[in-house]
Image (tube, helix red, strand yellow):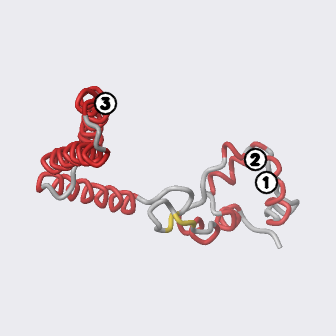
Amino acid sequence: MGMNVTAYARHRGVSHVAVLKALKAGRIVKEADGTIDPAKADAAWEQNTSQAQQRKPNHKEASDERQTEPSVSGTASIGGGPSYAQSRAIKEAYLARLAKLEYEEKSGAVVRADNVKVAWFNILRVLRDRVLNLPDRLAPVLAAETDPKKIREFLDSELRQILTDAAESSATQD
């Protein structure tokens, strides 16, 4: 059973002007009685119409035909991207997170990672230097000592002092 231009436009989800343009361009044809056979016209429309020139269906049909898919934020989106309201909500959530981080940084609850890395680098460099200088400092003293127990106590005392200084240094960095 044939349809008139308006009914076929409603059937396709396009304007009657789009149907008239398709008829004029020869992408679809009318039957002998002047009506449009929807099955034939649909097949001809798909075959003769460039996908690049196709407009997206209207919003009601889009929600019926497309499946919703989760977006980055976990909310459902239609057609690949979040709606304006969803985008606004995402933006507000990130702004709130940034404000929370800024507050925590200013209150001292969190510190910047690069500051921590620099502080630890400096502490460990001093520790390394002091440990590596230990033989040069202790060699003359230990060479004169003959008692192994005293040598061990002296080495133990020097190493503990270096480690205690490093611990105090790291505590003052906090």
Q: Position of residue 141 (x, y in %)?
A: 23, 31
Q: Secondary structure at mark 2?
A: loop
Q: Is residue 106 above or below residue 12?
A: above
In the image, which disc is placed on residue 46? 1
Mark 3 or 1, nearer chain start = 1
Measured in 3D between alpha carbons, the distance from the residue under mark 2 to the one under mark 3, in whole angstroms, is 86 Å
The residue positioned 71% from the left and 64% from the top of the image is 8
Measured in 3D between alpha carbons, the distance from the residue under mark 3 to the one under mark 1, in whole angstroms, is 86 Å
Q: Nearer the viewer, residue 49 or 105?
A: 105
Measured in 3D between alpha carbons, the distance from the residue under mark 2 to the one under mark 1, in whole angstroms, is 6 Å
Residue at the spot of label 3: 135
Mark 2 surroundings within 10 Å by alpha-carbon count, few (fewer than 14), some (14 through 19), many (20 or more)? few
Q: Position of residue 27 (x, y in %)?
A: 79, 47
- Image quadrant of residue 30? bottom right
- Circles 2 and 1, Cβ within 8 Å, touching? The answer is yes
Please state, as top left, top right, bottom left or bottom right, where the N terminus lies in the image: bottom right
Q: Position of residue 63 (x, y in %)?
A: 56, 69
Q: Nearer the viewer, residue 133 or 89?
A: 133
In the image, which disc is placed on residue 92? none
Q: Nearer the viewer, residue 94 or 64?
A: 94
Residue at the front extreme of this rendering: 146
The residue positioned 16% from the left and 51% from the top of the image is 171
Which amino acid is tagged 3?
Pro
Residue at the right extreme of this rendering: 32
Mark 3 surroundings within 10 Å by alpha-carbon count, few (fewer than 14), some (14 through 19), many (20 or more)? few
Which amino acid is tagged 2?
Thr
Apparent side of residue 64 relative to residue 101 in the rendered image (left or right): right
In the image, which disc is placed on residue 49? 2
Q: Secondary structure at mark 1?
A: helix
Mark 2 or 3, nearer chain start = 2
Which amino acid is tagged 1?
Glu
